[in-house]
Image (spheres, rainbow, N blue to C red):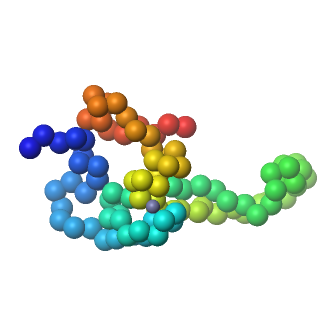
Amino acid sequence: MPFKRKSRGRSKGGKGSSSLVQCASCGSMVPRDKAKKNTRRVSFVEPQLAKELRQKGTYLSSWVDTKYYCISCAVHRGIVKVRAENERHTRYRRRR
Ligand SMILES: [Zn+2]
């Protein structure tokens, strides 16, 4: 059977089922290997203030905020984009 994507839209390979995670946006349960993981650094200090504090030598701790999104929410938020048909068979590259 021809596949729309090389990975069938998932990263599980040949293994069976995988655990579920909850989409951070709509709350639906999606398989962990299918969900899109979005990690970003969060800080409670405002960027302008943080810049000034850092200049004066303050150590500002920040932590990573990891969220999982289902495919439709990831597309809606621009984490992944709809790709051309011939591009879908290649591995997804992260755009920064
Ligand atoms: Zn969702």
Does residue 85 show up?
yes
Q: Position of residue 81 (x, y in %)?
A: 44, 40
Near-viewer residue (32 or 2) = 2
Residue 51 falls left or right of residue 4: right
When asked about the image quadrant of residue 50, the answer is bottom right
Does residue 36 show up?
no
Ligand 1: give its quadrant: bottom left
Residue at (18% x, 65% y) in the render = 16
Residue at (16% x, 56% y) in the render = 14
Looking at the image, how many numbered discs can be counted on the residues? 0
Residue 1 falls left or right of residue 79: left
Q: Is residue 5 above or below residue 58?
A: above
Most distant residue in the top direction: 86
Residue at (64% x, 56% y) in the render = 41
Q: Position of residue 15 (x, y in %)?
A: 18, 61
Q: Is residue 93 above or below residue 43?
A: above
Residue at (47% x, 55% y) in the render = 73
Near-viewer residue (55 or 25) = 25
Q: Position of residue 43 (x, y in %)?
A: 72, 60
Of the 4 image quadrants, the one containing the N terminus is top left
When asked about the image quadrant of residue 86, the answer is top left
